[in-house]
Amino acid sequence: MSNSLLSDLAGALVSGRVQMVDLTNTLSPDFPVIVLPPEFGQCAPFRMEKVSRYDENGPAWYWNNISMNEHTGTHFDAPAHWVTGKDVPSNTVDAIPAREFMAPAVVIDISAESAVDPDFVVTREFLTKWEVEFGRIPPRHWIALRTDWYKRVGTADYVNMQEDGAHSPGPDASAVEFMVHERDCIGLAVETVGTDAGQAMHFNPPLPAHSILHGNGRFGLQCLTNLDKLPTFGAMIIACPLKIEGGSGSPLRVVAMIEGKNV
Ligand code: MN
C-alpha cells in the first residue's frame, strides 16, 4: 500500500500510541532572556501590545503587535548566530533545508549532577561513560541535556545570575567536539537559557557550544521544557524556526513525538 508509513503514523496519533510532548515555554514579557556584560548590546524580552480586542479599534477582532529578540524564549540558534558559522552554507533560518526541522533525540539526564552543582560541566569522558551504560549516541540526533532547569522558570534560580555571572550547566569543548565530529549530532538541545554553561565565557575556548556547533553547521535549541517526559532514545523532535530573512535564530514551538505505553 502506498503512503503506509504516514498512514500508520496518522493512526498512531489518533489512537494515542504516538503522543505529543510540548517542549516549549510560554512566551511572556516575564520570561527571562540572556544577559550579556553591559558593554555589549542586549537581548530584548518579549513585548506584546494590544491592537484591538472587540473594541473601538476592532469591534469584531482581537490581535496584538509583538516584538522580541530572535533569541527570546524557547528558540532555535542557526549557524549564522556565531562568527564561526558566518561562512557556513545555508546558515540562516530562512535558508536551512526543511528536512532539518524534524530529527530524533537522545536525552542525556544530568539533572542529579546539576542539582548538586549548578556549574556541572559535561565532558567527553562523561559522554563516553554515559554511552557504556545507555548505548551509543546515533548520528543526526539532537543531543538533549535534561537538567530539570525548566522547573526553575519563574524564579531567580533560572538564569541564576550571581556577582560573577550566570551559573548553569553545560558542555566543555571536548564534549561538543565529540558530539559534532564523533557522533554527527544535528545540534544541542537544552533547558537552560543558552547551549553553553553559565560560566562558559571563562572556558577554553570561550563559549565552546556556540563556537563549535555553529562553526560546523549544527543548531541549538534553548529554553526547552519537559525533557524529563522524553525517553532516552526514541523521541522525534519537530522544531521549525520562523522563516526570518537572514535571521540568526527564532522563537518557535518545539514538540516531540513519543511512543505511548498505553494503546
Ligand atoms: Mn540563542
Image (cartoon, rainbow, N blue to C red):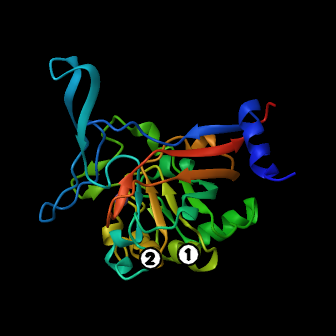
Residue at the spot x=46%, y=72% of the render? 213
Q: Is residue 14 visible?
A: yes
The residue sitting at the right extreme is: 1
Which mark sits nearer the N-terminus, 1 or 2? 1
* Residue type pointed to by label 1: Val
210 left or right, relative to 229: left
Q: Percent x, y for residue 93? A: 40, 63
The front one of 44 and 136 is: 44
Residue 180 numbered tag: 1
Q: Is residue 28 above or below residue 103?
A: above
* Residue 153: quadrant of the picture: top left
139 left or right, relative to 221: right
Q: Percent x, y for residue 49? A: 19, 33
Q: Is residue 263 above or below residue 206?
A: above
Residue contact between numbered discs 1 and 2, judged by CB atoms under 8 Å: yes
Q: Which residue is mark 2?
A: 212
